[in-house]
Amino acid sequence: MRLTRYFLPVLKETPAEAKIVSHRLMLRAGMIRQASAGIYSWLPLGYKVLRKIEAIVHQEQQRAGAIPVLMPTIQSADLWRRSGRYEAYGPEMLRITDRHGREMLYGPTNEEQITEMFQAYCGSWRDLPKNLYHIQWKFRDEVRPRFGIMRGREFLMKDAYSFDLDREGATRSYNQMLVAYLRTFERLGLKAVPMRAESGPIGGDLAHEFLILAETGESEVFLDRDLVELSLGERAIDYDDAAQLQEIFDQWTGSYARTDDTHDQALFEAQVPEARRVTARGIEVGHIFYFGTKYSEPLGATVTTREGDKVAVHSGSYGIGVSRLVGAIIEASHDDKGIVWPESVTPFQAGLVNLKQGDAATDAACEALYGKLAAAGLEVLYDDRDVRAGAKFATMELIGLPWRLTVGPRGLKSGTVELTARRGGATEELSPEAAVARLAQIYRGL
Ligand code: ATP
Ligand code: MG
């Protein structure tokens, strides 16, 4: 993409309304534009990142066995009356009346809708287990929308819903999602820790929030230093292997690795030696939840068991804040010059800076390199503006592309271009061919 043909409305000034760094940087880098309180348009750069995060979430959900669907944003109030949540949900739910006087709502979540869908088609133990998910916009009329897209009113969520015959099956589905989340967040370049959460009406400990550690996090957390260092790394996961899933679950959530919220501080102190205790702030990016038969009973989602009995199915729901993640990644990865994107979600894989726009030889060298990068399948933002080099560098640093290629008359004399890492700033001089090969190597498999 040539910058002169792109739509990248970067701001020089720091917007006064933005209280946290990710919000400031998203506005300055021209990623989002507020439409009204808590509601945003995604500008090209922001939209690209959102789509990349979404793609990784899709891949890891499907690897874990979840099946993609797409449910509507607008739901019927009657369905929610049947589960008893229409009244219970309160003012966060945006209620709408259509022209025929029918009560509708803009979905804040989809348990009712998916359970209704499930019961319409599934009636036997043979239909189980199933895990269906979608990535769809939600609306919650938050009292205090803030921090840009981090706490919006309209936001993009991945929500998956599992259906199992019994608690044992549901536990396995839960563990599949827990492990899929660990992998997803690692691929996004994030350190996310599962933290035991309030589990609502069911009790037990099958509810976890995934938190990214960042100073601007809304919740205070206590955790074991060892947990912060845990990683799935290259470990091969077999999502059909319940024992392996349970082992990973235990490793990440069992005693000593346990993280706890303020309510369980005493328990935390009993379990984790002082030297390993860490207090931090966290941003919630995911929530997994086992709720048994809470929705299947009122909505009639039953199956016939092998023995011929009729039982309500056991369900769980599993959310990821896809749009919130854009901000959360920036909170976790930036410096005083701007964003530092992880390679897996960067809007462009490299920036190309022409140091002497209008100089025939430099322009030709840039064009040739731009062509080679495209041929190697790399997505490049070519800054072909007629502005000084300093302004081009500042833009590249602000928008956070992990790699920058710089082409100027001096290097060209010796047949080289510069390849600079956004993180750390190390620069190498390479032939254009070697630079393309390096980048292709870096992005292989991502
Ligand atoms: P929070 O405590 O932050 O309000 P929640 O517990 O209400 O979150 P869930 O219902 O579990 O959230 O939704 C799943 C995920 O959706 C959350 O983990 C979060 O990442 C994201 N999310 C929830 N509310 C918002 C919002 N207002 N704006 C952006 N993302 C959100
Ligand atoms: Mg909420």
Image (cartoon, rainbow, N blue to C red):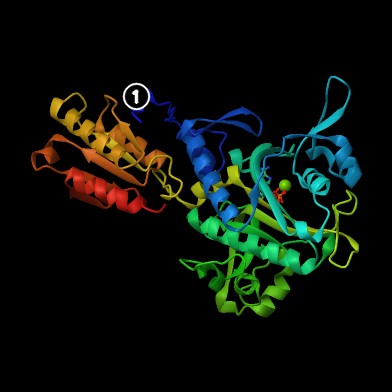
- Out of 306 and 68, give the one closest to the viewer: 306
Q: Does residue 255 appear to the left or right of 60 in the view shown?
A: right
Q: In terms of secondary structure, where does tag 1 sit?
A: helix
Category of crowding for the residue at label 1, using alpha-carbon neighbours closer than 10 angstroms: few (below 14), some (14–19), many (at least 20): few
Q: Image quadrant of residue 315? A: bottom right
Q: Does residue 313 appear to the left or right of 47 in the view shown?
A: right
Judge whether 36 appears above or below 208 on screen.
above
Residue 117, image x, y percentages: 79, 44
Residue 436, image x, y percentages: 25, 45
Q: Quadrant of the N terminus?
A: top left
Q: Indicate the amino acid at tag 1.
A: Thr
- Out of 231 and 395, give the one closest to the viewer: 231
Residue 162, image x, y percentages: 73, 56
* Residue 394 visible: yes
Q: Image quadrant of residue 255? A: bottom right
Residue at numbered disc 1: 4
Q: How many marks?
A: 1
Residue at 64% from the left image edge and 59% from the top image edge: 177
The answer as to whether callout 1 falls within 8 Å of ligand 1 is no
* Residue 263 visible: no
Q: Residue furthest top?
A: 99
Q: Does residue 125 appear to the left or right of 227 in the view shown?
A: right
Q: Residue furthest left?
A: 413
Residue at 21% from the left image edge and 33% from the top image edge: 368
Residue 249, image x, y percentages: 63, 70
Q: Does residue 82 appear to the left or right of 108 in the view shown?
A: right
Residue at 86% from the left image edge and 40% from the top image edge: 79
